[in-house]
Image (spheres, helix red, strand yellow):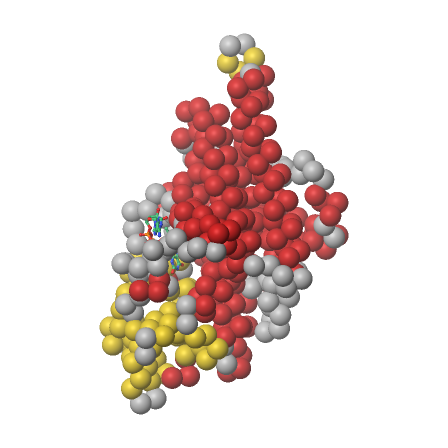
Amino acid sequence: MEQFEGSDFYNLDDLLTEEQRLIRDTVREFVDDQVVPCIEDCFMTDRFPLQIIPTLGELGLLGANLNGYDCAGLDNISYGLIMQELERGDSGVRSFVSVQGGLVMYPIHRYGSDEQKDKFLPQLASGKMIGCFGLTEPDHGSDPSGMITHAVEDGDEYVLNGNKMWITNGCISDVAVVWAKLDDRIRGFLVEKGSPGFTTTKQEKKFSLRASTTSELHFQDCRIPKANLLPGADGLAGPLTCLTQARYGIAWGVVGSAMACFDAAKKYSLSRIQFDRPIGGFQLVQAKLAEMLSEITKAQLLCLRLAQLKDSGKMTAQQVSLSKRNNVYWALEIARSARDLLGANGVTHEYPVGRHMLNLESVKTYEGTHDIHTLILGHEITGIPAYK
Ligand SMILES: Cc1cc2nc3c(=O)[nH]c(=O)nc-3n(C[C@H](O)[C@H](O)[C@H](O)COP(=O)(O)OP(=O)(O)OC[C@H]3O[C@@H](n4cnc5c(N)ncnc54)[C@H](O)[C@@H]3O)c2cc1C
């Protein structure tokens, strides 16, 4: 496999600081050394590359934009570049890091007690502990407000009952951030591995995100200490603010998948000879490559501006929706187009394109489907909610 070359048609590198470029290049090298060599096999054998977790921690990539508690405290451009580079390797690797940082460490950091922060955040930052985020249920996906999982108080404990489904990292987690109703309000609970009544099942037979562990979580009279309630999260806004963080990472991450597909398609189009010339010399092929590069460049510009808004505290959830919706849509279109350009080779694991294409089907669905983000934008534009 030839060395990956990123796309920077608008010289966006000039807008990055030296430190940001260094972080990007460090993660790119890590992905080349530790992800690329094993990821096709992980995808084919349906397993997450667990061996990379300590290095993710050592490099400061877990909860990288959080402050204190052994977190790297990076700006949001650096954080985005990390997501981009990880997803260039595989969406499953970026998902692991997004969930750990945006959906587990962020809610503990924002909504947790001092004791919870001290106990969990340094361990999660180092990768010694793994976390997951349980919101989706078998019958409640896009509309989590109807969730069935609930908690009741019993002395010094909460007793949880219900099921969560499609939970990234579920089976391999030491702690699950679980959203459940308490007195009809959605609250966040930290459920630790080994809690009585808590079990997990690995979800098999996925054709997408196969290098990511996806699980069901089961709570049958599951008992957790009262101290494991996240005190600061009350209502649906709790999980939604976490999703905004993770969607931000997705908007950047998929630029990495798109760049990987474009890079493979460009190189292939220059080396593959048909009708006595490289296929890159045909106008129809050039049209596809031109569209890929245009959409990658536009997605990069969206990400950079979104990062500036986030760093200045002005970013809105709706702006994140626009970027997630747009960038995932185009990354998937680019992956499909690259798959097409590779001909029959595009359906093999000799090239990363088919794997990225399959992964992006999940990315289009999770963290708010494409159409749910359309509705969020429609609501923002018109002031009229059209979800129901
Ligand atoms: C690999 C993977 C990993 C995941 N990881 C996690 C995780 O870690 N934690 C977690 O909590 N969840 C996770 N999810 C779940 C994911 O967030 C949900 O799948 C997603 O929210 C969609 O829910 P659903 O699958 O139930 O689809 P549904 O909500 O049933 O939607 C089905 C279709 O109906 C459309 N639809 C729904 N409502 C409307 C409407 N009002 N108007 C128009 N169209 C509508 C949707 O756009 C979609 O096309 C993961 C999913 C996958 C595939």
Q: Give how far across and how far down residue 238 sits, in percent.
A: 45, 69
Count the labels in the image: 0
Residue 10 percent across, percent down from the top left: 69, 38
In the picture shown, does residue 318 fall above or below 208? below
Q: Is residue 113 visible?
A: yes
- Look at 46% across and 80% down and name the residue there: 231
In the image shown, does 302 or 266 lie closer to the viewer? Answer: 302
Residue at position x 40%, y 30% from top? 347
- Rendering quarter of residue 221: bottom left
Q: Residue at x 71, y 44 (%)?
A: 13
Please identify the residue farthest to the top as the structure is shown. 276
Residue 83 horizontal side relative to residue 233, left or right: right
Using the rendered view, name the quadrant where residue 153 is placed.
bottom left
Q: Nearer the viewer, residue 20 or 151?
A: 151
Residue in the image at 60% along x and 59% along y: 315
Seen from the viewer's position, the closer of residues 20 and 15 is 15
x and y percentages locating residue 306 in the rendered image: 61, 53
Q: Is residue 63 left or right of residue 384?
A: right
Task: Quarter of the image for the C terminus: give it.
Answer: bottom left
Placement of 255 over or under 93, stated as above or below: above
Instruction: Please provide percent x and percent y for residue 248.
Output: 54, 55
**From this viewpoint, is residue 87 visible?**
no
- Name the quarter where the N terminus is drawn: top right
The residue most toward the bottom is 155
